[in-house]
Image: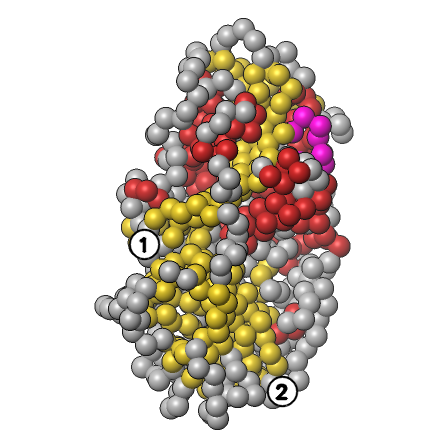
């Protein structure tokens, strides 16, 4: 097994990435100024450092915030790897009539054991929920809340089916941890995997350094060359899971044990699923809602699934509603703690608030920057419409003549470009997390001058066009390589040329049919590739253009395909690939847009 060098790992670690795990907490704390609806306010009693023993003897540590009053109350539990200490949230929830329990997950901060993402969260979640339900001031009803990995701790606990878990509020999280967390259509989500891991390593290094204080014993070690300097652990010491993720680049048994979407029919809990149009886990947030709405184990659970999607990215939103370099307005700011209380008031206390509505879906429609309630997702009135790619002289760069049209192509010559892994198309905003390039909507103009980017634009729109729902690209392409990538991105272009990112996608050729097995391509042969761009909701205003970018890289959001067919774990040799994109009657490449009649 090949390992990643300590030098490489520590390079990522020390490049300003350590503050990333706090990003979600910044969102929750900064956006909780508005009052909730519960009429009674309680004084709060606080108990810190409470031990909770798991079934295997490992002790986890929690803080408890509870109403200073007689009686029993529902429990709201969050289990986090990012440090449980959050007195603002704990006090807020307890003052509204809940027992708030904030726990460090296994191997993180004050909790015992070793941290390995996803592995222990089902059993530890089950044990903690049942412990919490039995507390003398608990009424036996437990809800969970939190985002990102803290959403994963909810979903993984839920599939263990603890009897006292009644409701969850998973925010910006996934439905599985292969596709949509670590990989996308077979391509490794490199920026996120690397930066999130190095952020987690901060506490792991602290814990390991604490165990390195007995220098007297260390000095006695033989052979002498085995002596390790503090702060210089191997990657296997700090994050063995990082290596495992790269080694398991197929959707194999390693990943299937944590595939939430396989368990929807077993789940009988109420859930508010919340995601962001610019969030790295959007596909899973929507997928969890759709899957549980359709397949949850009871009609009560199916009828009590809710979906909330804003313009958010996986980072804090400013008070003015600025995400990336776009300001969506104060209406885009989520009152996180208030939303927790309102949802749990409905789910655990049967208070008839806005969540009792018969419209279970609430989406933020960008372009118009308004909220709208819907009966379902995707919308039943969607008109899926193909916008075909066209060019005469060539679609290379923004100066080319690539166009989009609902008219199918006839006899057209293909577009070509060279993809060089040593000079990939750089990521500009979009669905990112945890360090380096900022997430959210940014203009894609910086990449429009590259010859390895094909640009297809609609005419200037004469009327508003709404696109809400799932988007795919059907691409007919050939390559000189035995393996390569094809990428797609859609943007809203205003009259100034500002090309606002909406959503993107990728397909790795060797996983074009299935991410469970490798199928290399035949050089020069035309294949049809389906690129999943996930979803968005946007009104392209009159005077704007719809623009699609086609290329073969989006780095570092996705790792570079070296075009050799080698596994990611061992690949070092780079080969340039000559790419040919077809758009003619036999090979009608197009983007399929979910048009909403207006």
How many numbered discs sit on the rendered protein? 2
Residue 161 forms part of the magenta stretch? yes
Q: Which quarter of the rendered picture does the C terminus lie within?
A: bottom left
Q: In the rendered image, which quarter contains the N terminus?
A: bottom right
Q: Is residue 82 visible?
A: no
Task: Give the percent coordinates (x, y) of residue 212.
Answer: 60, 34
Q: In which quadrant of the rendered view does residue 547 lie? A: bottom left
Q: Residues within 10 Å of mark 2 (few under 14, many from 20)?
A: few
Q: Position of residue 282 (x, y in %)?
A: 51, 52
Extent of the magenta region: 157-165
Q: Which residue is mark 1?
A: 368
Q: Which mark is residue 17?
A: none
- Seen from the viewer's position, the closer of residues 142 and 228 is 142
**Residue 325 in the figure: left or right of residue 537:** left
Position of residue 339 relative to residue 565, above or below, is above
User: Residue at point 63% right, 45% down?
Assistant: 292
Q: Position of residue 452 (x, y in %)?
A: 43, 79
Q: Is residue 409 magenta?
A: no
Q: Given this view, does label 1 or label 2 mark the residue nearer the observer? A: 1
Describe the element under mark 2 as helix, strand or loop: loop
Q: Residue at label 2?
A: 525
Residue lying at the far top of the rendered structure: 70
Disc 1 versus disc 2: distance between alpha carbons?
A: 43 Å
Q: Nearer the viewer, residue 203 or 154?
A: 154
> Which residue is depicted at the point 66% across and 49% down?
261
> How are the colours assigned in the image?
secondary structure
Residue 70 image position (x, y, % from top left): 54, 6
> In this rendering, is residue 12 above or below 118?
below
Task: Kindly identify the residue that appears in the image at 66 percent across and 38 percent down.
Answer: 299
Q: From what the image shows, is residue 299 above or below residue 506? A: above
């Amino acid at each position: 097994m090949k390992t990643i060098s300590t030098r490489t790992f520590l390079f990522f670690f020390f490049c300003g990435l350590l503050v990333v795990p706090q990003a979600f907490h910044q969102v929750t704390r900064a956006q909780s100024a508005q009052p909730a609806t519960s009429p009674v306010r309680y004084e709060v009693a606080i108990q810190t450092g409470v031990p909770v023993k798991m079934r295997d003897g490992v002790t986890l540590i929690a803080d408890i915030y509870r109403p200073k009053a007689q009686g029993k109350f529902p429990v709201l539990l969050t289990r986090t790897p990012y440090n449980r200490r959050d007195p603002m949230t704990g006090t807020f929830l307890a003052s509204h009539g809940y027992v708030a329990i904030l726990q460090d997950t296994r191997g993180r901060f004050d909790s015992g054991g070793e941290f390995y993402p996803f592995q222990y969260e089902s059993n530890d979640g089950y044990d903690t929920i049942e412990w919490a339900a039995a507390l003398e001031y608990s009424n036996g009803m437990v809800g969970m809340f939190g985002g990102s990995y803290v959403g994963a701790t909810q979903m993984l606990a839920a599939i263990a089916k603890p009897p006292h878990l009644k409701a969850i509020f998973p925010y910006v999280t996934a439905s599985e941890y292969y596709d949509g967390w670590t990989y996308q259509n077979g391509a490794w989500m490199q920026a996120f995997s690397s930066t999130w891991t190095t952020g987690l390593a901060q506490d792991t290094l602290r814990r390991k350094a604490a165990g390195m204080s007995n220098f007297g014993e260390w000095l006695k070690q033989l052979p002498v060359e085995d002596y390790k300097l503090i702060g210089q652990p191997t990657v296997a010491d700090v994050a063995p899971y990082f290596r495992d993720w790269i080694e398991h680049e197929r959707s194999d048994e390693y990943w299937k044990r944590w595939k939430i979407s396989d368990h929807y029919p077993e789940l009988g809990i109420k859930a508010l699923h919340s995601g962001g149009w610019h969030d790295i886990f959007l596909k899973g947030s929507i997928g969890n809602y759709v899957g549980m709405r359709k397949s949850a184990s009871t009609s009560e659970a199916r009828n009590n699934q809710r979906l909330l999607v804003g313009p958010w990215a996986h980072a804090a939103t400013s008070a003015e509603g600025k995400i990336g370099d776009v300001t969506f307005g104060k209406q885009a700011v989520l009152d996180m703690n208030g939303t927790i209380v309102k949802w749990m008031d409905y789910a655990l206390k049967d208070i008839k608030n806005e969540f009792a509505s018969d419209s279970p879906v609430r989406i933020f429609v960008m372009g118009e920057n308004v909220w709208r309630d819907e009966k379902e997702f995707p919308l039943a009135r969607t008109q899926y419409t193909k916008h075909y790619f066209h060019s005469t002289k060539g679609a290379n760069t923004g100066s080319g003549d690539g166009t989009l049209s609902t008219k199918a192509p006839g006899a057209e010559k293909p577009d070509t470009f060279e993809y060089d892994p040593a000079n990939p198309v750089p990521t500009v905003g979009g669905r990112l997390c945890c360090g380096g390039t900022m997430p959210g909507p940014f203009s894609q103009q910086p990449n429009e001058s590259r010859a390895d980017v094909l640009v297809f634009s609609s005419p200037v729109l004469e009327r508003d066009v709404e696109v809400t729902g799932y988007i795919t690209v059907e691409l007919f392409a050939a390559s000189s390589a035995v393996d390569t990538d094809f990428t797609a991105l859609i943007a809203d272009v205003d009259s100034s040329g500002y090309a606002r990112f909406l959503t993107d996608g990728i397909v790795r050729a060797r996983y074009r049919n299935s991410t469970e097995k490798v199928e290399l391509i035949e050089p020069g042969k035309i294949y049809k590739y389906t690129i999943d761009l996930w979803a968005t909701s946007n009104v392209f205003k009159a005077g704007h253009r719809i623009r699609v970018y086609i290329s073969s890289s989006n780095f570092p959001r996705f790792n570079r395909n070296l075009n050799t067919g080698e596994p990611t774990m061992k690949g070092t040799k780079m080969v340039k690939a000559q790419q040919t994109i077809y758009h003619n009657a036999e090979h009608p490449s197009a983007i399929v847009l979910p048009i909403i009649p207006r």
